[in-house]
Amino acid sequence: MRELLKGTTVGWLGHSAVLVQTKAGTTLLIDPFITGNPKFPAGYVMPAKVDYILLTHGHGDHLGDAVQLATKYDATVVAVYELAAYVAGKAGAKIIGMNLGGSVKLGDVTATMTDAKHSAGAQDDKGTHYTGVAAGFVLTINGGPVLYHAGDTAVFTDMKLIEELYHPDVAMLPIGGHYTMGPREAALAVKFLKPKLVLPIHYGTFPPLVGRPEELQALVPGVEVVKMEPGENL
Ligand code: NI
Ligand code: MN
């Protein structure tokens, strides 16, 4: 456990799936892509409870198992308004629909929805549905660290606003390329965001996602880029 996490556990479940457990006991699951995720750690034991499921956008590798898990855990799904409504229509789940720039209180966590530059839309057997826009989340934990999960995104200069407003300690950034930024662009994101720690996500899951943590680390020598195995905690 790193000191800057101040007792908060941050676990990577492969791809963009991240499990956050605060010292006070709030459990948040971000982008729970489990079924069909080749990097989901085999034998991983999911927590006994999940309070909130946060979705950055409606693509299948992020929406993932959210509907089933919301039912299983009686968890509240937090997403952009239209995506939250889509999930509620599937599961009758408890939802918090929000939008870019807004914040909601989730136990001892303030979750702020940030911009992301990416497409959105959820696909099922009836086709592709409009599920709002792609987003990221800043999680400001009471007495704990500030975490930023960028979702799927290109680099954008308004990441400077995220730094100015929230000062993220940990930035979870996609680096795979093809569908998101790669290491070169993520290095510029690191410059804008000024995190103490970078957790690379959305790489290595599928063949096109070729970006690797070592490439990003070489471009940002002053900041620690953590290379984790799925299933490990920061
Ligand atoms: Ni996507
Ligand atoms: Mn994706």
Image (cartoon, rainbow, N blue to C red):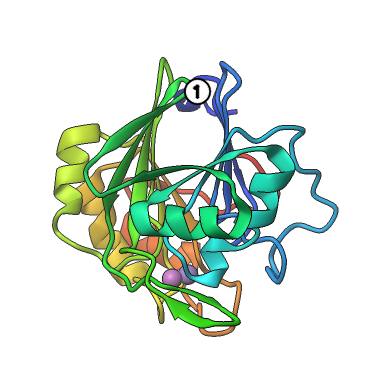
From the viewer's perspective, is 232 left or right of 121? Answer: right
Rendered-image quadrant of the N terminus = top right
Residue behind mark 1: 3
Q: Give left or right: position of 44 versus 64.
A: right
Find residue 154 and report its image quarter. Answer: bottom left
Tell me the residue at 14%/45% (across/down): 161
231 versus 217 height, above or below: above
Query: How many numbered markers are drawn?
Result: 1
Estimate the x, y position of residue 215 in percent, counting from the top left.
42, 68
Q: Residue sitting at 58 percent across and 46 percent down?
A: 93
Kindly identify the residue that appears in the image at 64 percent across and 46 percent down: 70
Q: Is residue 78 above or below residue 85?
A: above
Q: Is residue 192 above or below residue 120?
A: above
Does residue 229 appear anywhere in the picture? Answer: no
With 227 as the anchor, is 179 left or right in this view? left
Q: Position of residue 56 (x, y in %)?
A: 42, 56
* Residue 214 visible: yes
Q: Nearer the viewer, residue 45 or 35?
A: 35
Q: Quadrant of the C terminus?
A: top right
What x and y, as percent, mark residue 162? Answer: 21, 43
* Mark 1 element type: helix
The quarter holding residue 147 reads top left
Percent position (x, y) of residue 169?
36, 34
